[in-house]
Image: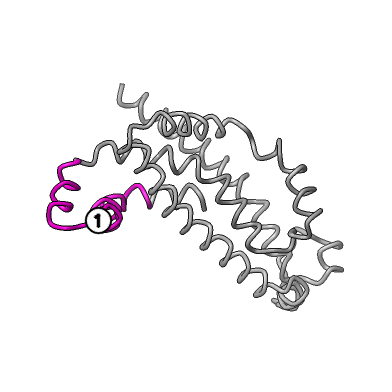
Amino acid sequence: MKKKRTISNWIKFIVLAILLFLYLVPFFLVLINSFKPRSAIISNPLAISSQWDFSNYVAAFKKMDYMHGFLNSLIITAGSVILIAILSSMTAYLFVRYKWKFNKYMFFIMVASMIIPFQAIMIPLVQIYGSINMLNSKWALIYMYIGFGSALAVFIYHGFIKGVPIELEESAMIDGCTRRQTFFKIVFPLLKPITSTVIIFLE
């Protein structure tokens, strides 16, 4: 039995090693060819160059305007994620703590909206924002990211806030905290694990 297990483990290891090799080969080829001039790539794409030429990276960096694009991505991503985390946690808290019929309907609508794929409304959105000259606006992208990410974030926060003891909030309010202070000083700090999860999902 031990020999059979050993042979089976070796077979699995060899198969996985082959699959890993096949998976890494394209990345390796891209890497070694990125340091070659175009003529060398065409003549022999599999050869490893004896001279390392970084001019391709410099040219790509300049043509892409990399720093400007990176800064835009950072602003849009960070701004949308921060706003989604704050607004979605507040919305989920409202849905959990206030048993209004309107809240139930809105929660179900937000959950149902998760079924709609982004690809189904991507073209109409581009047309609408293009018609009002907002395609090059950072705020337009942040607004769209908030719209698409809030439903999932509210759903995740909603389930977690249900487990937060309401006695903690009652104690804070007895001590003189307002509802807003209770949320930001008591409830929101307890949501750190789920906030990390939401950030990972949205990034």
On whether residue 17 falls in the magenta region, the answer is: no
Viewer-side residue, 21 vs 103 = 103
Give percent across and percent down for residue 62.
75, 77
- Residue 171 is left or right of residue 20, and the answer is left
In this rendering, the count of numbered labels is: 1
Residue 63 visible to an observer of this rendering:
yes
Q: What kind of colouring is applied to the model shown?
A: one colour
- Residue 83 is left or right of residue 58, and the answer is left
Give percent across and percent down for residue 174.
13, 52
Which quadrant of the view contains residue 115? top right
With respect to residue 73, does 92 lie above or below?
above
Q: Tell me the chief SS of the magenta region.
A: helix
Viewer-side residue, 2 vs 83 = 83
* Residue at image location 63% in from the left, 62% down from the top: 139
With respect to residue 144, does 98 lie above or below?
above
User: Which residues lie in the magenta part?
Assistant: 166-195
Residues packed near mark 1 inside 10 Å, few (<14), some (14 to 19) or many (20 plus): few
Q: Which residue is mark 1?
A: 178
Viewer-side residue, 185 vs 12 = 185
Residue 51 visible to an observer of this rendering:
no
With respect to residue 77, does 110 lie above or below?
above
* Residue at image location 57% in from the left, 41% down from the top: 18
